Image (tube, grey):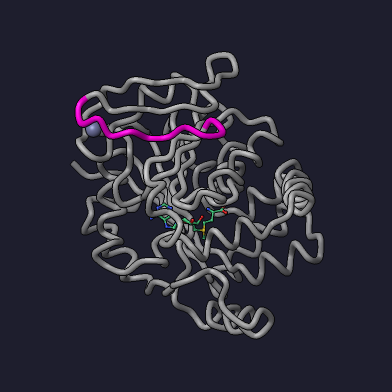
């Protein structure tokens, strides 16, 4: 944990921002092992592998499907994933393929800080970083293997970032700590009122929201049936795709006004990647097809007063 992270943190139990750090092992100014303690309520948060753990006691059961997804990956596979993504990022292809990065590239707002909520492997942060390299990155996940995997990805690609284990429903950050926060593939794993809690926590801690979720279309169900058939089960735990109007409604109910949107067809994107489709102009021309076969929706939103 770098000292700069303290500027953003707030105790998720008592909402005070007064901490003391007991460093047991450090690397320069980075606390690798130790304890972060809230001076107000005395809650203690372990620091391991430079990551602060805010919700360690419950993380095992609640994120179990994700713990499996991320711990199953062997280090060689992670390396191969990184190499493939690096080629796509370098050619601009992944950025075209990643709707969040596409929306951000088009938006002129000068975002300086970004929180990736439910960062998983960390690849979304990588895409976002490739279009906004100056932004300060903070990555959070509930799953312990998830957040460690994200840290490893960022370390291997040489991107400086901060990592926190915690929950989207009670973010360990100050009000307005970030210009922008995102959830990519998180809301569909919850129902109301948990979805409201996540969006409210985003509205407390950030001014803009990039929100990506699968939407309820025949293409979603086709892909899902295919995965279930190939793997014997759906590997990502509880998941309900959102109706487009429902997604717009829960954003609105939680003070988020949509400023721009994009849609993406995941099967189409896979097909293009599979065919090693490289031409950006050609890909853009497929926007119509993406809308028609859309699988995911992504909205860039601004917080209302
Ligand atoms: C579909 S994955 C997100 C993929 C990720 N954005 C990526 O690039 O790999 C959903 C993620 O949400 C995380 N998650 C689940 N419940 C959470 C919670 N309550 N708070 C924060 N993250 C959570 C999971 O551990 C998982 O990493
Ligand atoms: Zn406290």
Question: Residue drawn at (37%, 41%), measured in percent from left and top?
Answer: 54
- Expressed as whole percent of the image width and height from the top left, the position of residue 235 reads 57, 72
Is the residue 74 above or below the residue 304 in the image?
Answer: below
Lateral position of residue 300 relative to residue 196, left or right: right
Is the residue 221 above or below the residue 215 in the image?
Answer: below
Q: Inspect the magenta stretch and tell me whether residue 150 lies in it.
A: no
In this rendering, does residue 261 appear at all?
no
What range is drawn magenta here?
40-50
In which quarter of the view is residue 198 placed?
Answer: bottom left
Labels in figure, total: 0
In which quarter of the view is residue 113 placed?
Answer: top left
Question: Residue drawn at (58%, 14%), measured in percent from left and top?
Answer: 28
Is the residue 101 above or below the residue 193 in the image?
Answer: above
- Expressed as whole percent of the image width and height from the top left, the position of residue 161 reads 54, 31
- Expressed as whole percent of the image width and height from the top left, the position of residue 249 reads 26, 65
* Rendering quadrant holding ligand 2: top left
Q: Nearer the viewer, residue 303 or 51?
A: 51
Is the residue 190 above or below the residue 202 in the image?
Answer: below
Question: Residue drawn at (25%, 30%), measured in percent from left and top?
Answer: 42
Furthest residue in direction front, as rendered: 24
Which of the image's four quarters has the C terminus? top left
Q: Nearer the viewer, residue 199 or 234?
A: 234
In this rendering, does residue 239 appear at all?
yes
Furthest residue in direction top, as rendered: 28
Question: Residue drawn at (21%, 29%), measured in percent from left and top?
Answer: 16
Q: Nearer the viewer, residue 99 or 30?
A: 30
- Expressed as whole percent of the image width and height from the top left, the position of residue 110 reads 44, 29
Lateral position of residue 28 relative to residue 250, left or right: right
């Amino acid at each position: 944990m770098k000292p700069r992270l303290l500027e953003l943190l707030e105790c998720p139990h008592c909402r005070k921002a007064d901490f003391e750090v007991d460093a047991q092992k450090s690397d320069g100014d980075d606390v690798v092992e130790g304890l972060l303690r809230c001076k107000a309520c005395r809650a203690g948060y372990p620091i391991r592998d430079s990551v602060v753990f805010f919700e360690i006691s419950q993380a095992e059961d609640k994120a179990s499907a994700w713990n499996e997804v991320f711990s199953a990956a062997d280090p060689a596979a992670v390396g191969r994933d990184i190499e493939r993504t690096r080629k796509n990022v370098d050619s601009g292809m992944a950025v075209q393929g990643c709707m969040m990065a596409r929306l951000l590239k088009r938006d002129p707002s000068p975002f300086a800080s970004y929180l990736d909520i439910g960062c998983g492997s960390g690849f979304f942060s990588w895409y976002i970083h490739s279009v906004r390299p100056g932004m300060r990155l903070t990555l959070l996940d509930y799953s312990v293997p998830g957040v460690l995997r994200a840290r490893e990805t960022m370390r291997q690609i040489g991107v400086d970032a901060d990592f926190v284990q915690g929950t989207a429903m009670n973010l360990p950050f100050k009000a307005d700590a970030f210009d922008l926060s995102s959830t990519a593939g998180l809301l569909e794993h919850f129902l109301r009122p948990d979805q409201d809690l996540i969006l409210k926590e985003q509205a407390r801690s950030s001014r803009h929201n990039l929100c990506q979720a699968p939407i309820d279309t025949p293409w979603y169900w086709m892909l899902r049936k295919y995965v279930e058939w190939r793997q014997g089960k759906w590997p990502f735990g509880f998941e309900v795709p959102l109706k487009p109007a429902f997604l717009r409604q829960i954003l609105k109910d939680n003070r988020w006004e949509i400023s721009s949107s994009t849609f993406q067809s995941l099967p189409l994107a896979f097909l293009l990647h599979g065919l090693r489709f490289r031409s950006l102009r050609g890909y853009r021309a497929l926007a119509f097809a993406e809308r028609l076969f859309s699988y995911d929706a992504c909205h860039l939103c601004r917080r209302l007063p």
